[in-house]
Amino acid sequence: MKFLDETKVYIRSGDGGAGAVSFRREKYIEFGGPDGGDGGRGGDVWVEAVDGLNTLIDYRFQQHFKGKTGTHGMGRNRTGANGDPVTLKVPAGTQIFEEDNETLICDLTEVGQRYRLAAGGNGGFGNAHFKSATNQAPRHANPGLEGQEKNIWLRLKLIADAGLIGLPNAGKSTFLAAVTRARPKIANYPFTTLHPNLGVATIDGREFVLADIPGLIEGAHEGVGIGDRFLGHVERTRVLLHLVSALEEDVAQAYKTVRHELEAYGHGIAEKPEIVALSQVDVVDASERAEKVRALKKACGRAPFEISAITSEGMTGTLRALRDIIVGAKAEEDAAKAPAAGTKGDADS
């Protein structure tokens, strides 16, 4: 299945049904009068986050969504049926923007969340609605109100616990393939990864989701290379795993390049907890490895993990470090959501 994380669609809610002009005429019944019913309401347009999706690829083939028109009113005071609504089903983590692609309409972060994007038009009143003491036989009814129409943008930001960042060929996809069942494309050339990949890692009985994004190069925030458009997929992560390849001539500069791009991108990514690892250590000798560990430690201010996805060296320790930060962050979030204990008792006293 192909990956699509941003698309533009057209939506239109249904028009309301028209009211009816009708008069009651029955044999042997002395009094008639207006009995035109109201029109039905037009169908709404909704968006809903559902389980089992991690891409917006369905919207590459269909970009127009319209609610049904309400049924017109009928005689004998019969109200028309409401038009059927239409629902756009999207993955959790999808943001909806106005046509300018900047004004946020809603952010669906959990499965089951719904939002009405466009309300259907109200149905028109039938002539029975206009009957009065001075107008006992009204011969007019209201048309239904028109529905709302607009273009909107759908933008997906994958929801993962940890994000893999680094320069191209830093070993991110190899790491993901080694610790999860994901099977990203792996090759010995830059920008092998062209779209984000997700995988579920397990360590000591605990699971967490890893997101691998295409590599960043200098100037990515200005659109160089693939650019920084995929950084949105690590905005929601709780921790970043920054991989620096031992094959880099200057590991300190490689680290600083990616950090600079994170800071230039903004959105709080640069402030996230970060674990730094020197990857692909199995392909350099001991002296070169020690020298690069020292250089990377000086650049990032702490001792990096030394890992190899091929020999599995350092992988368990790195996963446990990621897990500890994720578990701690989840505990803090749960504590913030829970009401303060004893608040009611303090108020009563």
Image: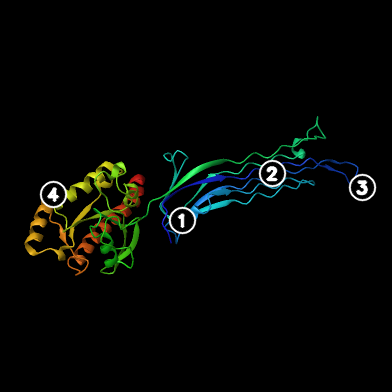
Q: Position of residue 31 (x, y in %)?
A: 88, 41
Foreground: disc 3 or disc 4: 4
**Of pointers 3 and 4, the one earlier in the residue sequence:** 3
Q: Tell me which amino acid carries mark 1.
A: Ile
User: In the rendered image, is residue 323 in sight?
Assistant: yes
Q: Secondary structure at mark 1?
A: helix
Which class describes the residues within 10 Å of circle 4: few (<14), some (14-19), or many (20+)? some
Bin the neighbour count of mark 3 within 10 Å (Cα to Cα): few under 14, some 14-19, many 20 and up: few
Q: CA distance from mark 3 to mark 4?
A: 97 Å
Say whether residue 108 is visible: no
| Mark 3 or 2: the one toward you | 2
| Image depth: mark 1 or mark 4 in front | 1
Judge left or right: residue 123 versus residue 187: right
Q: Mark 3 near mark 1, Cβ–Cβ under 8 Å?
A: no
Where is mark 3, residue-wise?
27
Residue 17: mark in rendering: 2
Between 171 and 347, which is closer to the camera in this rendering? Answer: 171
User: Circle 1 is placed at which residue position?
Assistant: 57
- Kind of residue at badge 3: Lys
* Sequence-earlier tag: 1 or 4: 1
Of tags 3 and 1, the one toward the viewer is 1
Image position, residue 70 (x, y; %): 67, 47
Question: Which label number is shown at residue 209?
Answer: none
Q: Secondary structure at mark 2?
A: loop
